[in-house]
Amino acid sequence: MKLILIGFMATIGFANVHAQARQVAPGADLIVHNARIFTGNAAQPAASALAVKNGRIYSVGTDAEVLDLKNANTRVIDSRGRRLIPGIIDAHTHVLNEGGYNYTLRWEGVPTLRRALAMLNEQAKRTTEGHWVKVIGGWSPYQFEENRFPTMDELRRAVPNRPLIVQYAYNRAFMNQQAMDALGVGTEKFPKVPGTEFEKDAQGRYTGVVHGYTFLFIALETMVPQLSFDEEVSSLIQTTHHLNRFGVTSIVDAGTGFREYPKAQATVNVLARDNRLNIRMPFVDLQFGDGSVNMVDGQIKAITKTAPIGPGHNLHPQLAHGHVYRGAGELLSAEVHDHENFDRPAVIIEPEKMRELVERDVSKLVQRRIPFREHISYDENITPFLDALGKLNEKTPLDGLRWSIEHAETISPANIARVKALGGGIALDAKMAMHGDGFIKTHGRDKALLTPRLRQLVDSGIPLAMTTDAFRASSFNPWVGISWMVSGKSVSGAEVLARDNRLSRAEALKLFTRNAAWFMNAESELGMIAPGHLADFVLLDRDYFEVAESQIKSIASVLTVMDGPVVYGAQDYQSLSPALPEILPAWSPIKHFGGYRQTR
């Protein structure tokens, strides 16, 4: 009887093994070997190969160890000795603001103003009747060999027959006569936004140059021709494709000033439905509304009544951290927005308004356990915000609720310590790489060299990320910011960071990988090459840790993997890149010039 029982149990066990084998085949789905892997994992800082199974990394080690996991169905990729890093996480950018991406000519990476103007002229001939020629942010006059802005005469010659607007960050715009007429410059039609200034010539006529702040340019964008829904979907496909090109596999969408939740999610839903969203895209939400309710009340209504969701709710049906609601921000009240226009003096908010923001609005978010982020650029405004937040914490404890200050360019050591004590994080941005030369003209070189206090921020141990704040305020290319953190130089080549305020290459990369995962609530799953982590990683076209500092800003991906599949391939791996649908519309500047001009 004992022998019969043993045989019976063995038979059952054998059957179970076969059933499991049918469900989960042994071996790796993907192996990448012959690589120089920067893992970001102190326990295993380097390796040469990794294996992926079901969207996660499950082995990291030597070529021999990992290749032993190969089976007949494993895709094997030879890195040919290239550098492999974790997928880049941009913890503060504005993808959903770029519904009009395919309508926009991008000057990012263009080395000369001469070439930038020629691109305008080419696009003017291509753009169909009824549409505009637009350059909307992402560039800097300091990137050009000429080291200057275009003149209005140059712009008018480049685009003689279509309305033209060239926008520099959220600082100023250049418009030809057709654009001024369409926007009603000098009439009641033009938006009356505080801080707006028009340049005039000696005869008192408008030159076409207008200076302003963020809300002016948001308003203007609603007054130009808009995309069809299919064109917006095409724009999102192209936006994520160009992010993948630079190794970006995750972003936090930091709110849209053009369409609010749930409308802003419509294009994402199309790609998520078909599992074609090639980037993880958690989001925070801001609600401008019609001005009849405050922005936090609008946020609470949107997520509790309009389209109910809660913090941590993933709107993507399949992708981990695919499209997760992560709370309110980056703007909680328009009246305390201290626009970071480095061409003008700092915008200092009345301390009482900061106190009201926290007592009236942030308190509602804390009570409901809704995470929040607040845009504050200048230390003079951070101080009263933290004063009020500290008092709120005494009455209504934050108790581990995730919150952060976004940008924080001039934060002081004292306020760094206060943010840490209150359990907050700081999402910096790389705008000084693009606009540091302008900051020096306004605020002085000495202050620029300590803006932000990178060394102290990193050494503080506070949850900290570097971000791009793309696509308007700065470039979406994270390598521009990484270059600045390491070299201390802006895109013009000028020194804008003190030598003792710079970071090592590993530290700078960590701010765009492991550290940035905290802002996604994903630090246990993203930001490292380690077993159990999600399979997001990048093969680089040159070795970040060995190339000259001057080459860092030109680094790009040759292979980007997100969640296991290849989402971008170039050079030796171009055949692995997924096919993209035709760009809409046919005259799109993105179709003809791409999203970023890369110089070698």
Image (cartoon, helix red, strand yellow):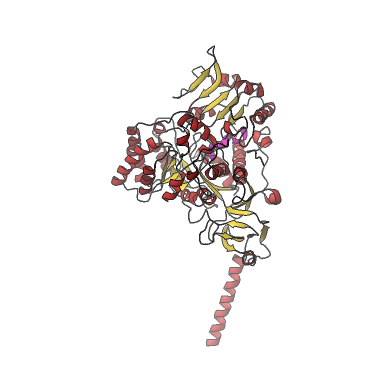
Q: Is residue 176 above or below residue 302?
A: above
Which image quadrant for residue 205? top right
User: 295 or 420, which lies in front?
Assistant: 420
The location of residue 498, given as percent across then percent down, is: 49, 41
- Residue 121: in sight, yes or no? yes
Q: Residue at x 38, y 35 (%)?
A: 380
Q: Residue at x 55, y 49 (%)?
A: 88
Quadrant location of the C terminus in the rendered image: top right
Q: Residue at x 65, y 54 (%)?
A: 82
User: 529 or 409, which lies in front?
Assistant: 409
Q: Is residue 234 above or below residue 576?
A: above
Magenta residue span: 94-110
Q: Is residue 260 magenta?
A: no
**Residue most toward the top?**
203
The location of residue 581, given as percent across then percent down, is: 67, 42
**Residue most toward the left?**
395
Which image quadrant for residue 239? top right
For this view, does 69 lie left or right of residue 291? right
